[in-house]
Amino acid sequence: MGTNEFPRGFTFGVATAAYQVEGHIENDWSEWERQGKCKDPNHRCGRSVDHWNRFDHDVQLAKEVGSGAFRISLEWARIEPVRGQVDAAAVDQYRQRLLRMKAAGIRPVVTLHHFTHPQWFHRETPWHEPSSVVEFRRYARICAQILRGLDALVITFNEPMVLLLGGYIQGVIPPGIADGNKAMLALGNIARSHVAAREELLRESGKCEIGISQNMLAFRPDRWWHPLDRALTRLAFDNYNHAFHRALTDGELRIQMPGLASTRQRIEGGRDSVDFMGINYYTRAHLRFVPKPPFLEFQYRDIHGRGLTDIGWEDYSEGFSHLLVELHHKYGKPIWVTENGIDDRQGQRRPQFLYNHWSQMLSAVRQGADVRGYLYWSLMDNFEWLEGWGPRFGLYAVDFETLERRPTPACHYFRRVAQSGVLVEPEQVSEPMKSEDSMPTVAPSTVAL
């Protein structure tokens, strides 16, 4: 393999999440928005980008950029809007869509839990209660029926540490709790729910690879000379990046967040309960100790003069290879990059961003990391949680009024590399997508599937 060649069988693809793209979902996040708790209280997901009605068209968009895999999530609130009552039509729709995706030559990558919950969940069986594991097991059993025979890559939970910190420490996302003890109970139950889901998936759906997607950050002490900044950086690296991965490889959940929360729990069945390590990588955080809870501040700094991304994050591709190599050395398992992307509202920085991160990924591969695939976040612009409609992560730009999807300059570059398996610099790919083999830029007619 040449230095610019991707491994044989390497998969390029794209990622989405149900609530952010499907539209017309009533769940805990839609309740959160009605309470005005997004950064802009006027933002509502609503119809989102209507992916529910444009699914086949969007699968074709993914195919046009060379995707061999497409990550979607199943929406628990669609499947079980009332506790114990399954919507059979929604279950059938998800299965039929995944069958069509596979028939189109694209491997399904399916997330069971991507932040959202049915509206009954936090009120009746919240994560800090043992009943949550029972409920998630039942939901996973339904998902396993959807996935039967599809040879899908299955992600049980997306970014559990983000859910923990945002929902149970800071209280800025659902369920809006700020309680360290409940946070530790919740995280333990989420780990047990992964184990329960794995059991149901293997029993019902046959062959599939099962893991999680863990948001991982590069960390740096804000003041190199300050011992407490350095200590915070070590703690953050271990707790944030590795605590959940470790719970599902050696079976013990260990977290130490002085002044906030700590735990040490055995996770029955957790040892070696993932087939791959999923990593979502975006940026680096600079940590500074402050003498009051939560005892740290973090910020993004433009150390290399590349300019912060439009959401305000550091563009730090070097951290990508370091984390991939560390995952390889710590766990020795196959790795999937389940998210990586840039908020680029003018659409001009994305090709170079891809080149830089793909270069770092290949560097990690040369150092032994078994990276099997890369999924770009996201196929198209969508509703970005608390940030609402501001960020633009899509390979395809979306007009949020007309819902028209338009290729950004990154589309042709992504396709060139994905189809050839050879990394070239963006300047070497100047030819736009040809009209006869690109998707129309006019929004398709809405067809209820």
Image: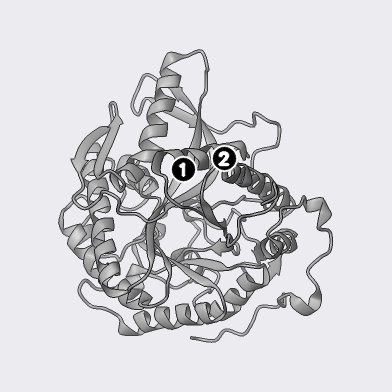
Decide: few, some or many residues near mark 1? Use Cα within 10 Å; few <14, some 14-19, many ≥20: many
Residue plotted at (48% across, 86% down):
449
Residue plotted at (71% across, 76% down):
439
Which residue position holds label 1? 328
**Quadrant of res 63:** bottom right
**Quadrant of res 292:** top left
On screen, residue 36 above or below 136: above
Residue 36 pos. (x, y %): 42, 54
SS assignment at label 1? helix
Number of numbered markers:
2
Residue 196 pos. (x, y %): 23, 61
Residue 313 pos. (x, y %): 58, 40
Depth check: 403 or 373 in front? Answer: 373
Which residue position holds label 2? 367
Residue plotted at (57% across, 84% down):
446
Residue plotted at (28% across, 26% down):
259
Q: What amino acid is found at the position of numbered circle 1 in the picture?
A: His
Decide: few, some or many residues near mark 2? Use Cα within 10 Å; few <14, some 14-19, many ≥20: few
In the image, taking residue 448 as reference, residue 179 lies left or right, namely: left
Ranked by sequence position, the earlier of labels 2 and 1 is 1
Q: What amino acid is found at the position of numbered circle 2 in the picture?
A: Gln
Residue 26 pos. (x, y %): 37, 69
